[in-house]
Image (cartoon, helix red, strand yellow):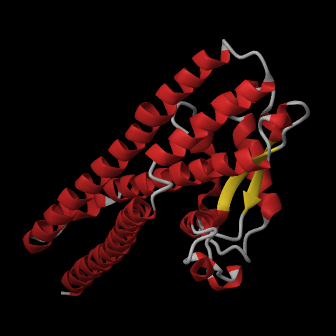
Amino acid sequence: LDQGDFIVQFMDMAEEEMKKTMDEIIPTRLETLLELALRTSTANADPFKDDLKVDLVPYDLVTQLFRILSIDTKREKDYKVDPTDLHLSGLEAFTFDYIVKWPVSLVLNRKTLTRYQMLFRHFFYCKHVERQLCGVWMSNKAAKISTLQSCRWYASAFALRQRMLNFVQNFEYYMMFEVVEPNWTVFESNMESVSNIDDVLAYHNDFLDICLKDCMLTNPELLKIVHKLMMVCVTFSNFVQRLNQSTNVELEVAKLTSRSDTLQAAHTARER
């Protein structure tokens, strides 16, 4: 997600497909886009690239985590949601899956892969929000030729967009470089002294536990706050994008009207 071009390639290719609902998405198309992204990026050199697969899960990340955290508690029944009632988009349902061969499957079992998927979905959604905010930044050219009153409004929107972008990028940086990377380094150093498979499982579970905890995926209250902040960023991005589109339409109409008036004046002058 952070150090390769593969994920950027894939998100560029699959962006339109991800906007659709789960019922409208064709999984084979996503698989094709994934394979194309792998073949046309630096990931092509990875000998295990063909083991990476696309998966669409019936729950968004927040619902999935709350269901797990509420097991054997009084709130467990509160999160028994019918998946058809969630109306998920492709982005909310998307995750990667991985085909693990024996004997590596002893360590990378289904429970472990589910934890990796939860981390990935968290990172992936943050990356999507960052891309949305960057898209707003790129589409702000229309504001430069707006009226003075509109420019004042846009200035406030630009400042808010920059604060949102700073937050999302710093949050991503924190998770990548202050949580995952140092803990992975510790895990690798611990692996040098293992003597049996039980030690490997223990160190690997410790690594995943710390990552989930420090990325705020085990605290429901913190997770709700982070999710709400991300939703505010997405709502803001969609609003500004719609506003920019309407502004562009108005500018085109104004240009056409002006051009029509010029042609009409020239035609009248010729008749005279």
> Is residue 236 among the parts visible in the rendering?
yes
* For residue 55, side relative to residue 159 (left or right): right
Place of residue 183 in the rendered image (x, y in percent of width and height, measured from the top left): 51, 29
Quarter-of-image position of residue 19 = bottom right
Q: Check the image and name the residue furthest to the top.
A: 192
Place of residue 70 in the rendered image (x, y in percent of width and height, measured from the top left): 58, 69
Above or below for 126 versus 170 = below
**Camera-side residue: 256 or 34?**
34
Residue located at (74% from left, 77% from top) = 23
Q: In which quarter of the image is the C terminus?
A: bottom left
Above or below for 248 versus 181 = below
Place of residue 214 in the rendered image (x, y in percent of width and height, measured from the top left): 44, 44
Quarter-of-image position of residue 51 = top right
**Camera-side residue: 218 or 143?**
218
> Is residue 87 among the parts visible in the rendering?
no
Residue located at (40% from left, 65% from top) = 221
